[in-house]
């Protein structure tokens, strides 16, 4: 009896060891079927990721939902990181509804890929998944995806429209950089638009931003040169640096929810009017720089951080002159409460002929009078202790009367015209020691 038990115990142990070794070997397996390479991602559940072999697939590709390895049926649940990166002859891909994840750079630089079918089962799309797919004409983002990742659709120039589903809460850096999108609606589910998310979308003409977005990232819509229509949601709190730089916006209304507008957020735009909401407390440098057509600035009456006087924008104490509308004509006398003339404050005020600066002013910042082309005279009192670079660039007919006898050390080199050490522009001159 003892020998009988021992025999079967040994046999059982051998069978267990054999099964364990076979399972271990299977778990380590990367195997190929045709032009596709499969990698085991979960041995217990028999799940695999798929990608291309060195002999890359061409033309139309249908990825199977299951595949057999040594007689074991495996479920394809993900597209490998870099799985089809550089498959330059792939034209269309159909992904099965067994897949839940598309890996980083999965289809990067598939330059003639025109069509891809992404099932509703997909929950995540990795960084740069379709980066450089310049021929991709359309793509569906499933309603199960919550994050549109970094550079996901970077350089997809042929995509003219896309629907962002209500499941998405975050659009990350460069997600749609240099796309062919014509219009975009950000749904109410989205809370954050990352930096450069839609930068260089040159065909973009209209943007509607939903009512849950709190932050519009740095350069988010920068260089969208044909963007003319913008509707900002009522939850936006921060419009970051250069968010709409060099767009074609003709007017903008800053919602009452906005507290911060970053440097150059609307610079180099085609703005004719701006409406500033009641909660704006922080405005960066040159927010509306080079907006040559800006004629009207409106400030919400409940805003306690800024003041409008004669159409000119100041801080609440009127110690900082922030922005003069470009339509200001003739002579302008700066109030004697002002201590600082801000960056680009009078930039492109082409109808101004003279500016009177009081002796309360201590600082004139860079490009303060940039291209005031018809400015004929301006006085700089001895109270001014600091002047930035290129304050009078483009003021080719201006006489600059300085009360001090010579340039103070605190005035930057190139203070009057950053391109010349001395003011040599035709017709312009500096006169020292004027009382």
Image (cartoon, rainbow, N blue to C red):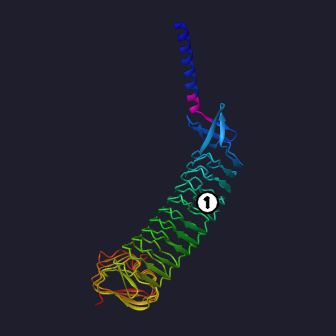
The quarter holding residue 30 reads top right
- Dot 1 falls on a residue whose secondary structure is loop
Q: Position of residue 262 (x, y in %)?
A: 42, 69
- In percent of width and height, residue 137 lies at 66, 60
Residue in view at x 55 percent, y 29 percent = 24
Q: Is residue 63 above or below residue 297?
A: above
Give the image location of residue 425, x and y in percent: 45, 83
Q: How dense is the environment of label 1, judged by Cα within 10 Å: few (below 14), some, or many (20 and up)?
A: many
Residue 289 percent across, percent down from the top left = 45, 76
Q: Residue at label 1?
A: 156
Left or right, residue 69 beside residue 288: right
Viewer-closest of 136 and 388:
136
- Up/down of 428 relative to 254, above or below: below
- Position of 345 with respect to 53 (left or right) is left
Q: Which residues are magenta?
A: 23-30
Q: Residue sitting at 59 percent across and 57 percent down?
A: 141
Q: Is residue 26 above or below residue 365?
A: above
């Amino acid at each position: 009896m003892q020998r009988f038990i021992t025999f079967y115990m040994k046999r059982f142990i051998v069978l267990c060891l054999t099964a364990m070794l076979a399972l271990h070997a299977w778990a380590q397996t990367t195997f190929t079927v045709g032009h596709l390479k499969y990698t085991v991602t979960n041995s217990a559940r028999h799940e695999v990721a798929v990608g291309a072999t060195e002999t890359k697939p061409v033309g139309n590709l249908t990825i199977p939902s299951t595949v057999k390895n040594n007689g074991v049926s495996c479920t394809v649940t993900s597209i490998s990181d870099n799985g089809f990166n550089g498959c330059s002859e792939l034209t269309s891909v159909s992904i099965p509804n067994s897949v839940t994840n598309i890996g980083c750079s999965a289809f990067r630089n598939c330059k003639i890929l025109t069509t891809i079918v992404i099932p509703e089962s997909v929950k995540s799309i990795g960084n740069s998944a379709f980066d450089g797919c310049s021929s991709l004409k359309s793509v569906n983002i499933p309603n199960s995806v919550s994050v549109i990742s970094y550079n996901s659709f970077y350089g997809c120039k042929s995509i003219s429209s896309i629907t962002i589903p209500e499941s998405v809460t975050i659009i990350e850096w460069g997600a749609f950089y240099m796309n062919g999108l014509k219009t975009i609606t950000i749904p109410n589910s989205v809370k954050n638009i990352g930096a450069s998310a839609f930068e260089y979308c040159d065909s973009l003409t209209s943007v509607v931003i939903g009512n849950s977005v709190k932050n519009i990232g740095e350069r988010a819509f920068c260089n969208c040169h044909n963007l003319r229509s913008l509707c900002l949601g009522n939850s936006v709190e921060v419009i970051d640096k250069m968010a709409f730089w060099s767009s074609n916006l003709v007017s903008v209304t800053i919602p009452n929810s906005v507290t911060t507008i970053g440097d150059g957020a609307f610079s180099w735009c085609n703005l004719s009017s701006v409406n500033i909401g009641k909660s704006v407390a922080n405005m960066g440098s040159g927010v509306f720089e080079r907006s040559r057509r800006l004629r009207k600035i409106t400030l919400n009456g409940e805003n306690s951080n800024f003041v409008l006087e004669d159409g000119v924008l100041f801080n609440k104490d009127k110690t900082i002159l922030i922005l003069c509308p470009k339509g200001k004509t003739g002579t302008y006398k700066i109030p004697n409460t002002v201590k600082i003339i801000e960056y680009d404050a009078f930039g492109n005020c082409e109808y101004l002929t003279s500016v009177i600066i009081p002796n309360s002013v201590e600082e004139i910042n860079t490009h303060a009078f940039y291209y005031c082309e018809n400015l004929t005279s301006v006085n700089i009192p001895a109270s001014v202790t600091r002047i930035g670079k290129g304050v009078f660039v483009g003021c080719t007919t201006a006489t600059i009367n300085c009360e001090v006898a010579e340039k103070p050390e605190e005035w930057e080199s190139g203070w009057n015209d950053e391109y010349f050490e001395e003011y040599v522009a035709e017709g312009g001159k500096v006169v020292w020691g004027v009382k």
